[in-house]
Image (spheres, grey):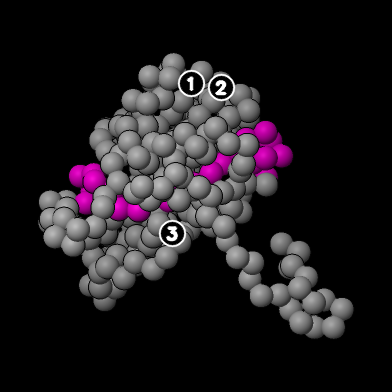
Amino acid sequence: MKALVTGAASGIGRAIADRLAGAGYEVAALDIAELDVSDPAAWARVQQGLERLDVACLNAGVITGASSVAELTDEQYRRILGANVGGTVFGVRALLPALEAAGGQVVVTASLAGLMPMPNDPIYAGTKHFLVGFVRSVAPQLAARGVSINAVCPGIVDTPLLGEDGKAAFAAADFPLLSPDDVVEGVLAALESSETGQAWVVQPGRMPEPYRFHGVPGPRTPGAVGVRPPL
């Protein structure tokens, strides 16, 4: 069995790669030195010669470090879109033939910031909302090709991305942090389930579980009460 993990040099990605390797997978653990996930040409090179792929964990991601949209730089904006959004969209597109050949599975690392507001980094939250919406929306067409896709949405994780100041702030507030291994449990839950298009919530002290979205209000026009749009 073959697996590919992006953002695998440290933190969540490293933990995922180690766990899959321990389970017997042949793991391609890729980070920025091996793959710029924001570059379609780099993904095309990964695709070449990759005939079958059982699991793809698209985990690479960054933050902006900017809470103020007024102070957001073009470079910060392009960097986070490239890594967080492009790294998933280009990855799914490039890996789909190999995943289809194996009846494979995709797990995307999103965040609770994709299910709730995050005022201290709204662009990061926006990218994670995109990932949740993308996973839920693309799932039916991938399922038709024998491929499942799910997102994991962890809370605050003790990784280098959090930084020492961030860790100190959460410690001072006595707020529990997840470990990367906790997030791996969410990844495994998604892989072991028969579901697709789900956002698996991972929080300290709780078993990973799919987030249950409430339906949006439907129309009340006579003859079309509650009808969903044909999208």
The residue shown at (78%, 70%) is: 227
Q: Amino acid at mark 3?
A: Gly
Mark 1 → mark 3, Cα distance in angstroms: 29 Å
Above or below: residue 159 compared with residue 22:
below
Look at discs 1 and 3 and give the one toward the viewer: 3
Which residue is label 1 attached to? Answer: 2
Label 3, secondary structure: give it. Answer: helix
Which residue is label 2 attached to? Answer: 52
- In this picture, which residue range is highlighted in magenta? 141-162
Percent x, y of residue 178: 30, 46
Percent x, y of residue 116: 42, 65
State if disc 1 and disc 2 touch (CB < 8 Å).
Answer: yes
Above or below: residue 202 compared with residue 25:
below
Label 1, secondary structure: give it. Answer: strand
Which residue is label 3 attached to? Answer: 114
The residue shown at (18%, 62%) is: 173
The residue shown at (63%, 37%) is: 194
- Magenta-colored stretch includes residue 146: yes
Q: Amino acid at mark 2?
A: Arg
Look at discs 3 and 2 and give the one toward the viewer: 3
Look at discs 2 and 1 and give the one toward the viewer: 1
Q: From this viewpoint, is residue 72 visible? A: no
Indicate which disc, 3 or 2, sits on the residue closer to the N terminus: 2
Above or below: residue 25 compared with residue 45:
above
Q: Amino acid at mark 1?
A: Lys
Indicate which disc, 2 or 1, sits on the residue closer to the N terminus: 1
Rendered-image quadrant of the C terminus: bottom right
Q: Residue furthest front?
A: 205
